[in-house]
Structure formats: structure tokens, C-alpha cells
């Protein structure tokens, strides 16, 4: 299969995931505000503000991955996808919800690995090799 096509499919998938989550966060998804409050002990108002900013950042990640993927952003997306999946069992939702979200971290990691692991700081912050 054409690796360019696979990269585009992964880019679209990662961008869609981060855009969708970003919009839900900007909309103030109640569960996420509750989980933020539970995990870090902030007030619901502060949690809502933090969730809004996280959502805005997620939308920026989506646009970067779609328009001009950068390795450090893909590494962040893999980390953030793993963390946000792990939040579910940490707040008592359950491990199946964590497992169900494996693609949230695996897709950005696959895209990064398909392009070759960066060998220098300059490569981490440069355009993805395609």
C-alpha cells in the first residue's frame, strides 16, 4: 500500500480526534470538568476554564497535524491521547474505556514512526518527513 496514503489517513484520523475532543472541551463537557476537579482538586469554575484552554490547544494540534505535521506535536498527541484515555480508570469510569481509546495514542505514534524517529532537536521541531 502507498505509504503516503496511509500517512494521510492517519493525519485525518488524528486531526479528527483532536478537533472533536477540542470542540467538546470548548463546549464544557460536564464529565471532563468533573474529572478535572476530581483529579487536581480545582473548583468546577477553574476546571471549566482549564478544559476550555485544553480544547483550544487540541484544535491547534488538529490543524497542525492536518496541515503541516511536526514530530514533536505528534509525540505530544500520542502522550496526550494516552493520558486522556488513562484518566477514565483513574476517575472510576473503568479500564474498558481506557482500552477502547488505544487509537487515540496509537495513531499519532504510528504516524510519527512511519516518518522516522527524529535524530536531532531540529528534526523534532521541523516538518514531518514524508
Image: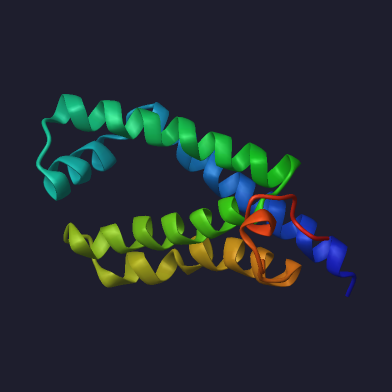
Pick the front one: 109 or 6: 109
Toward which corner of the image does residue 41 lie, by quadrant?
Answer: top left
Question: Residue 73, image x and y in percent?
Answer: 57, 50
At 16% from the left and 61% from the top, the residue drawn is 92
Q: Which residue occupies 44% across, 60% down?
A: 79
> Which quarter of the rendering shows the C terminus?
bottom right
Asked if residue 62 lies left or right of residue 94, the reply is: right
Instruction: Give the residue displayed 58% in from the left and 54% down from the top.
Output: 72
Residue sitting at the far bottom: 1
- Count of numbered marks: 0
Taking the spot 46% from the left edge, 42% from the top edge, the residue there is 21
User: Quarter of the image holding residue 33?
Assistant: top left
In this view, the residue farthest toward the right is 2
Q: Position of residue 43 (x, y in %)?
A: 11, 30
Q: Position of residue 81 (x, y in %)?
A: 45, 57
Is residue 32 shown left or right of residue 104?
A: left
Q: Position of residue 19 (x, y in %)?
A: 56, 39
Image quarter in which the N terminus is found: bottom right
Q: How is the image coloured?
A: rainbow
Q: Which of these two is toward me, 102 or 59?
A: 59
114 lies above or below 72: below
| Depth check, front residue: 128 or 43 | 128
Above or below residue 50? Residue 124 is: below
Amino acid at each position: 500500500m502507498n505509504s503516503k496514503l496511509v500517512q494521510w489517513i492517519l493525519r485525518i484520523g488524528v486531526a479528527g480526534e483532536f478537533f472533536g475532543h477540542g470542540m467538546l472541551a470548548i463546549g464544557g463537557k460536564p464529565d471532563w470538568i468533573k474529572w478535572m476537579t476530581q483529579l487536581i482538586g480545582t473548583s468546577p469554575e477553574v476546571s471549566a476554564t482549564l478544559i476550555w484552554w485544553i480544547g483550544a490547544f487540541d484544535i491547534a494540534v488538529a490543524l497542525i497535524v492536518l496541515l503541516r505535521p511536526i514530530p514533536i506535536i505528534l509525540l505530544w498527541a500520542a502522550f496526550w491521547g494516552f493520558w486522556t484515555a488513562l484518566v477514565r480508570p483513574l476517575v472510576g469510569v473503568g479500564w474498558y474505556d481506557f482500552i477502547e481509546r488505544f487509537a487515540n495514542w496509537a495513531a499519532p505514534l504510528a504516524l510519527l514512526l512511519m516518518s522516522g524517529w527524529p535524530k536531532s532537536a531540529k528534526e523534532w521541531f521541523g516538518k514531518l518527513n514524508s
